């Protein structure tokens, strides 16, 4: 029964990891950064001098960037924890692979599925824990193109 619980937890973790294999969090944070800049421009253009407006934008940029880095850093850390938990469950299931069913009512674990889950997770590792890196890349592209 313990194996079945590990297996079910592993499948749930795999789903959560799969949901995190996207660049959407980094894109969303970049959109927030752009949107805030645009809002400042719309609200204060013509109210302040270009120099003061530039200082306001610079201050906003650094404060927002700091907040985004903390948020995406936490996102990446949680993703790392998911991968670590998955590894623990995989190792536990692999170590019990040779255990014999104790009753006819126990739901045997499909070890081929465990191996497939492990491959999927290994293929997803870099994307799920690299949101901060993805954001930095996108932000640098924006700065280079003059969008921020």
Image: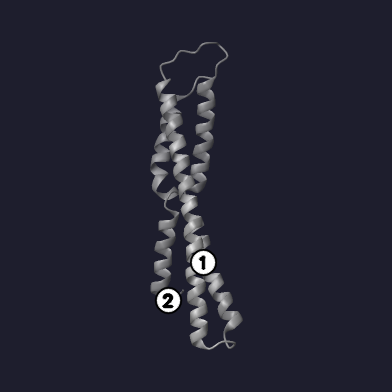
62 is higher (above) or lower (below) than 116: below
Is label 1 or label 2 in front? 1
- Classify mark 2: helix, strand or loop: loop
Mark 1 or mark 2: name the one nearer the start of the chain: 1
**Within-10-Å neighbours for mark 2: few <14, some 14–19, many 20+:** few
Left/right placement of residue 70 relative to residue 140 reads right
**Within-10-Å neighbours for mark 1: few <14, some 14–19, many 20+:** some
Left/right placement of residue 121 relative to residue 53 reads left
Q: Residue at x 46, y 54 (%)?
A: 73
Mark 2 highlights which residue? 146
The answer to the question of whether label 1 and label 2 lie on touching residues, with beta carbons closer than 8 A, is no
12 is higher (above) or lower (below) than 108: below
Q: Is residue 50 visible to the viewer in this orientation of the structure? A: yes
Mark 1 highlights which residue? 64
92 is higher (above) or lower (below) than 16: above
Q: Residue at x 50, y 87 (%)?
A: 50
65 is higher (above) or lower (below) than 56: above
Extreme-top residue of the structure: 103
The CA distance from mark 1 to mark 2 is 18 Å
Q: Which image quadrant: the N terminus?
A: top right
Q: Position of residue 5 (x, y in %)?
A: 54, 26
Q: Residue at x 42, y 44 (%)?
A: 124
Q: Residue 119 occupies which quadrant of the picture?
A: top left
**Which of these two is toward me, 62 or 104?**
62
- Classify mark 1: helix, strand or loop: helix
* Residue 104 tag number: none
Q: Position of residue 32 (x, y in %)?
A: 54, 66
Q: Residue at x 52, y 46 (%)?
A: 19
Q: Position of residue 59 (x, y in %)?
A: 50, 74
Left/right placement of residue 39 relative to residue 20 reads right
Q: Position of residue 95 (x, y in %)?
A: 40, 22
Q: Is residue 23 visible to the viewer in this orientation of the structure? A: no
């Amino acid at each position: 029964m313990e194996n079945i619980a590990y297996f079910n937890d592993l499948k749930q973790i795999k789903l959560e990891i799969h949901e995190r294999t996207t660049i959407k969090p980094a894109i969303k944070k970049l959109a927030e950064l752009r949107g805030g800049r645009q809002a400042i421009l719309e609200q204060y253009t013509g109210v302040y001098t270009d120099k003061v407006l530039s200082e306001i934008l610079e201050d906003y940029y650094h404060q927002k960037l700091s907040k985004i880095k903390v948020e995406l850093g936490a996102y990446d850390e949680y993703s790392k924890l998911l991968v670590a938990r998955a590894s623990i469950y995989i190792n536990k299931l692999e170590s019990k692979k040779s255990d014999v069913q104790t009753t006819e009512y126990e739901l045997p674990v499909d070890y081929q599925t465990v191996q497939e889950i492990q491959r999927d997770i290994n293929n997803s590792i870099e994307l799920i824990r690299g949101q901060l890196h993805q954001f930095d890349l996108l932000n640098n592209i924006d700065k280079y193109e003059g969008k921020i």
